[in-house]
Structures are given as structure tokens and as C-alpha cells.
Amino acid sequence: MPAISIGRVRIGETPRLVAAITGPQVPGQPAAARRAGADLAEFRLDYLAHLPDDRLVETARKAARRSPLPVIATLRPSREGGSSHEGAAADEKRREAVLCAIVPHVHAVDIELSSLALPAVVTAARKAGITIIVSYHHFQSTPSLGRLVALAQLAKAKGADVVKVVTMARTPVEVLRLLSLLSERPGWPIAAFAMGPHALLSRVMGSFCRSALLYGALPGAGRVSAAPGIPTITDLKAAFRQFRLG
């Protein structure tokens, strides 16, 4: 497997915990993620989409500079689970411009396989020398293993350094189907885990199966959920300790 890093963190050998941060503008959130045990911070910039684009970029840049963890930037459209129907989150060209402007200031960018902005963001990320995560989300169910493999291969062909596949798993059988993707061992890092009632189970099993990345929310009252059923980083660490996974 090729050597891939997000900042100082090597990807692919050991599952890495990513804190999904919905308030990157709030001082102390990345530090709280590090204290909770996260390896990386994902800045969900769609939660800042109400800001003018230049202010959004500047806010994210300053937050990334202060972060004690390497930063993954993403700006989800609503069709891919994004929080906003306004601003840059609702306009593909503006979203492309914001992501291309932020890539020199972060360590990785996450762009959806379905996005029209994918080619431009991949080009900008390559120029900036940062890691590219190409992601696929299915919010209704978990497709067949053959379909998942084909999607992962397509994401890699489109420029992914890391492929991320996240589906809705309503039964343990769907969790097993999703995680079977990790057994394919294609030669590049794949992250696979579920949303919904089996989100925690999928991450515990995903750690066994060497999912490259596993995502959790910040602990504490008042946090905003970044995805259906997402467990906290604290819950993940506790589960891993119980099963002696880390």
C-alpha cells in the first residue's frame, strides 16, 4: 500500500479516529477533539455556509492554523447530508471555489464522488500537495457488495488517495456487507462504516477490519450531530478499550 499521510498522521496501517467538528469557528473544539482521543479533525464547513464565501474561507483558515490536529476540510451539499440549503453549500460553483481556496490551508480535503466540483478540487489539492478523500454516501440502505466495490474503484480512478464509503445500515447483515468491502484489500486505503442504529457497531467492527478512518462526534452537551447515529469519540474509545482495540 502506498504511503499516505494526513499531516503527520500515517493513513492505512492503523485505523485513525476523526472528530467531525460542526463548529470549527468555536475556539477549543479541535483541542477538545484531541483530548478526547481523536487523531484528526474534520471541519464541516457546510455549518458555516451562511457566511459570505470569503469570510467562510478566512474563518476556516484561521481555525485550521490554530488546530492541534491535522485538518480535513469538507463542505457537504444537502443531498450528501450537508446541514445547509444556502450559500456555498447550495451552489456547486461557489462550493468548488470555496474548497479550492481552502486546500492550501488544510491537510486533506473530502469531496463527494457525485460532485461536479470533483475534478477541480482534485486538481487544486494535488497542486497544494494535500491528501484527497473521495467519499460516497447512501442514506437509505447499503448497496450490494459488487456495487460498493465498483464505487470504490471509480472513486480511486477519479483521484482519491483515500476512498470513504458510508451507508445506512439498518441490520447487522448490512453492516457485514459494507465491511466486506474492506476485505477486498485493493491496495489503497478505504474507510467504511455505517450511519443509523448500527453506527457504533460498524465502527467497532471496522476497527477489527482496518477501516482507514473512523468518524465520531465531539463529546459534550450541545454538540450538533454530523450524521445519523454518529457516536462520540469518547464512546468509540471506550468501546475500543472494551474489545482491546486501542
Image (spheres, helix red, strand yellow):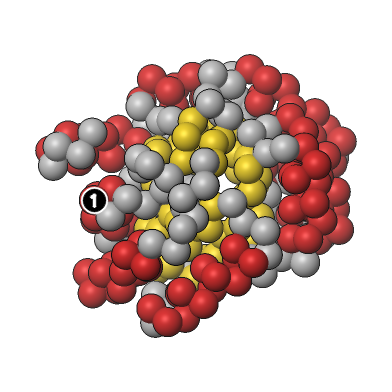
Residue at (26, 69) in percent of width and height:
176
Task: Tell me if residue 241 comes above or below residue 209 in the rendering.
Answer: above
* Residue to which mark 1 is pinned: 208
- Residue 84 in the image: state x and y as whole percent: 67, 54
Specify whether 56 is left or right of 36: right
Q: Nearer the viewer, residue 15 or 229?
A: 15
- Residue 150 in the image: state x and y as whole percent: 51, 77
Q: Quadrant of the C terminus?
A: top left
Q: Give the class, few, some or many, for how many residues have Cα within 10 Å of label 1's Cα (few <14, many ≥20).
A: some
Specify whether 33 is left or right of 119: left
Residue at (63, 17) in percent of width and height:
66
Specify whether 245 is left or right of 63: left
Q: Nearer the viewer, residue 71 or 54?
A: 71
Residue at (58, 29) in percent of width and height:
7
Q: Quadrant of residue 140?
A: bottom left
- Residue 164 in the image: state x and y as whole percent: 50, 57
Q: Quadrant of residue 50?
A: top right
**Number of numbered tags placed on the structure image:** 1
| Camera sees residue 215 | no
Q: Amino acid at mark 1?
A: Phe
Residue at (64, 34) in percent of width and height:
107
Q: Secondary structure at mark 1?
A: helix
| Camera sees residue 106 | yes
Specify whether 13 is left or right of 85: left
Task: Tell me if residue 85 comes above or below residue 60 in the rendering.
Answer: below
